[in-house]
Amino acid sequence: MIELLILYVLTKRELTMYAIHKMIENDFAPYTSPSFGAIKPALRRLESNNAISSRKLMSDGGKLSVFYSITKKGHELLKELLLDELSDNPLQYLSNARVKLSCAEYLNVDEKKDLFLSIKTLALKFKFEAENILNDEYHKHSFYQKIVLDNVICEYSNLITIIEGFEKDNACNSK
């Protein structure tokens, strides 16, 4: 997911590693917070794959700064990463779905439709599984388990509602 975030922020403008970190922090902090230790190797991987390019400039203070920009291959990779299937692990799914939905503006109408459908399908699956566990009469759930399961169901319901709103907006924009 770190590569997706880096490529997405680089679609806005050329940035240093510090500025990439700050932009990701400013835009995505409620659901992810990658460290410099994660960003630096991701930048190297992206650059070695020609998804980004770098140039070095000497600042007025005499400090060398490296600026990164997205390449044509990087734009293609960003679309691939946005449209890749999400994890079947609910723990990873929610944060990754939020990141992808936040970056959906980058996609065209048909690509958004595919993204929304794939995210919504998994959200419905996870919500259904949580409801089945909560309503299973053969297993005695503690008060705490019931509250947590109810919260999980609410989270998925809210995500589904958000996606349905995005789907309506996307349908209006396709006309």
Image (cartoon, rainbow, N blue to C red):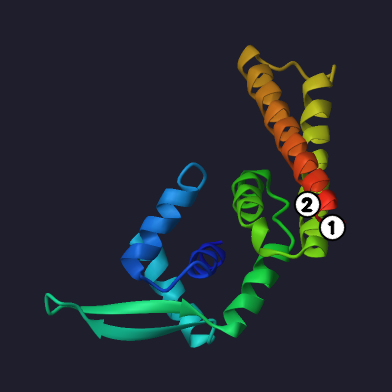
Return the residue at label 2. Answer: 116
The type of residue carrying mark 1 is Ser
Is 69 positioned to the left or the right of 125 in the image? left
Eye-nearest disc, 2 or 1: 1
Q: Residues within 10 Å of mark 1 (few under 14, many from 20)?
A: few
For the residues bearing labels 2 and 1, Cβ distance under 8 angstroms = no
Q: Give x and y (percent) for residue 86.
A: 71, 56
Image quadrant in which you'd find residue 67: bottom left
Residue at the image position 82 percent from the left and 59 percent from the top = 114
From the viewer's side, name the closer residue of 58 and 24. 58
On-image quarter of the N terminus? bottom right
Q: Give x and y (percent) for residue 159.
A: 71, 37
Return the residue at label 1. Answer: 174
Q: Give x and y (percent) for residue 155.
A: 67, 31
Image quadrant in which you'd find residue 153: top right
Visible residue check, residue 121: yes
Q: Give x and y (percent) for residue 163.
A: 75, 43
Residue at the image position 41 percent from the left and 77 percent from the top = 68
